[in-house]
Image (cartoon, helix red, strand yellow):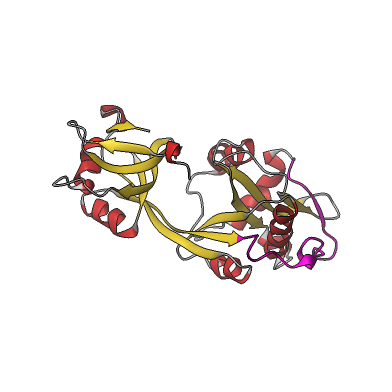
Amino acid sequence: MAEADWVIARTSDGVPVLRYRRGEREGLPWADLLEVLDGSGAVDPVEFVRDTMPGWAVSGSTGFGRELLALGATPLRHAHALRRDLLADPPPADWADAPLREGLRAVPCDRAPEELFDAWRAAFAPGHVDRFAGDDRRALAERLIPLLAGTAIGPVLPASLLAVDADDRVVGGVVLTDRAGVPWVGDVFRHPERGYPGLGTDLLRRAVADCARRGLAEVHLTVTEGNPARRVYERLGFTLVHTALTVVVPGDARATGGPAGSR
């Protein structure tokens, strides 16, 4: 990531304490990829975040997140970032045209969010670690629509695919996005009640192969702790980059503009 992409957070007298990538998450200001900087001296970075970033979502190391939890923060997500190198480890040639399950066809991911919603929502059933806690209306409005509109992570890439059945119903899909220039898997889903076990794997193989064909160097994704899909991703060549714990700092984000910072 380019140096210009980072925000350097400083004390009131200009001491650099940490750096992060600024974004928005769950409607909150978000400090992503937070790192503590060397040379912050006697400044406690955890207390600095608590005091200068009330109401922010903060994603950093597991240890840093746990220290914030001890100060009253609320857990949001414990997840692992994985990466697949498409240059050093090109996908097998047969991934590009891997057939889908009988009766299904692959189509571009260019349909209205409402057409994807049933399969997408069913894939994250109650009890799933990635289940959105709100009702269907909020799940559509706050999760799926922003993902497909490119406002949640980034623009949807052409390698994204949907699987439709003989009745042209969406039964699964893989949505790849451009996250600050990096291909990122936003979601992989399959409607469990319509069968086709392994469909998500088939679609992801195709999408990864398409990325390689387009000359992309890598593909990234994030998987929540406890999601068994991690084993599938690792079988497909994704390897661990880092683990992050995202928490919401106690307080109201409107009470302060956040820490003094510079790019």
Q: Horizontally, is 240 left or right of 147 in the view?
A: left
| Residue name at image x 24 percent, y 55 percent | 67
Image spot of residue 78 (x, y percent): 41, 57
Residue 52: x and y, percent? 24, 36
Residue 204 in the image: above or below residue 45: below
The answer to whether residue 263 is visible is yes
Q: Is 236 located above or below residue 162 in the figure?
A: below
Quadrant of residue 143 in the image? top right
Q: Quadrant of the C terminus?
A: top left
Who's the residue at 17% across and 31% down the image? 13
Nearer the observer, 146 or 142: 146
* Residue 20 horizontal/vertical position (percent): 37, 42
Identity of the residue drawn at 58% across and 39% down: 154
**Up/down of 87 relative to 248, above or below:** below
In the image, the segment drawn in magenta is 85-110
Q: Position of residue 127 (x, y in %)?
A: 49, 61
Q: Main secondary structure of the magenta part?
A: loop
- Nearest to the observer: residue 133 or residue 100: 100
Q: Is residue 96 magenta?
A: yes
**Residue 23 in view (yes/no):** no
**In the picture, residue 166 is in which quadrant?**
bottom right
- The residue at the point 58 percent across, 37 percent down is 146
Q: Is residue 85 left or right of residue 242?
A: right
